[in-house]
Image (cartoon, grey):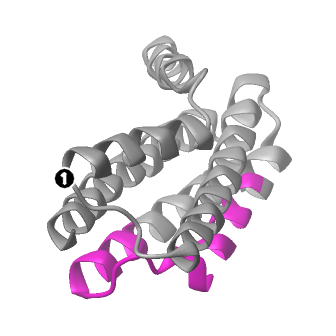
Amino acid sequence: MRKLVYGLICGLFIMGLGTDAEEIQTARADDADKCESKPADEKDLEGEKRLSKFMHEKLTSSQLVLEGLMIEDYEKMQKGAKRMIEMSNATEWQVVEGPIFARQSEEFRSAAKQVIKFAKEKNIDGASLSYLHLTMTCINCHKKVNKVLISQR
């Protein structure tokens, strides 16, 4: 079981290598060109840059949790997960409003709290599975938010 969990985590980590916030932003900009809609003004561009920086910081916190899992550093796991919870309460987090996004955010916070709980218990398997759940909440939310943003263009 432990090897399977580590394999899944390593796979997620490898998939994320080489993808930084600028590349993600570029992909969105390309999608915007396909939809023939562009940011209305400089204020929109500035907002996108702030959001991109914010999401990159979230990714850095996620990587801290992953690093903690790889080296069984329970303090790192807790630090990264706590930072992600703090960030999820920030104004920048609220990209889309509504009950679906609120539910996604709550599920994200719940998964991060589970990582912390298992890290405090020094339960590497529980922390690993919770991290996988946390990662899946990110992916699912990004899919939903991107659909909403594209439909608003």
* Nearest to the observer: residue 82 or residue 32: 32
| Residue 123 image offset from top left, x and y in percent | 63, 41
| Residue 7 image offset from top left, x and y in percent | 48, 13
- The residue drawn where x is 60% and y is 43% is 21
* Nearest to the observer: residue 75 or residue 23: 23
Q: Main secondary structure of the magenta part?
A: helix
- The residue drawn where x is 33% and y is 86% is 97
- Residue 89 visible to the viewer: no
Magenta residues (range):
80-107
Q: Splitting the image into 4 quarters, where does residue 19 fall?
A: top right
- Amino acid type, label 1: Cys
* Nearest to the observer: residue 84 or residue 22: 22
Q: Which residue is mark 1?
A: 35
- Residue 131 visible to the viewer: yes
- The residue drawn where x is 60% and y is 41% is 22
> Is 68 placed left or right of 124 in the picture?
right
- The residue drawn where x is 68% and y is 75% is 86
The correct choice, above or below, for 91 with respect to 1 in the image is below
Task: Answer whether residue 95 is magenta in the image.
Answer: yes
Quarter the C terminus occupies: bottom left
Q: Splitting the image into 4 quarters, where does residue 66 fall?
A: top right
The correct choice, above or below, for 107 with respect to 63 in the image is below
Label 1, residues with CA under 10 Å away: few <14, some 14-19, many ≥20:
few
Quarter the N terminus occupies: top left
| Residue 64 image offset from top left, x and y in percent | 75, 42
Secondary structure category for the residue under label 1: loop
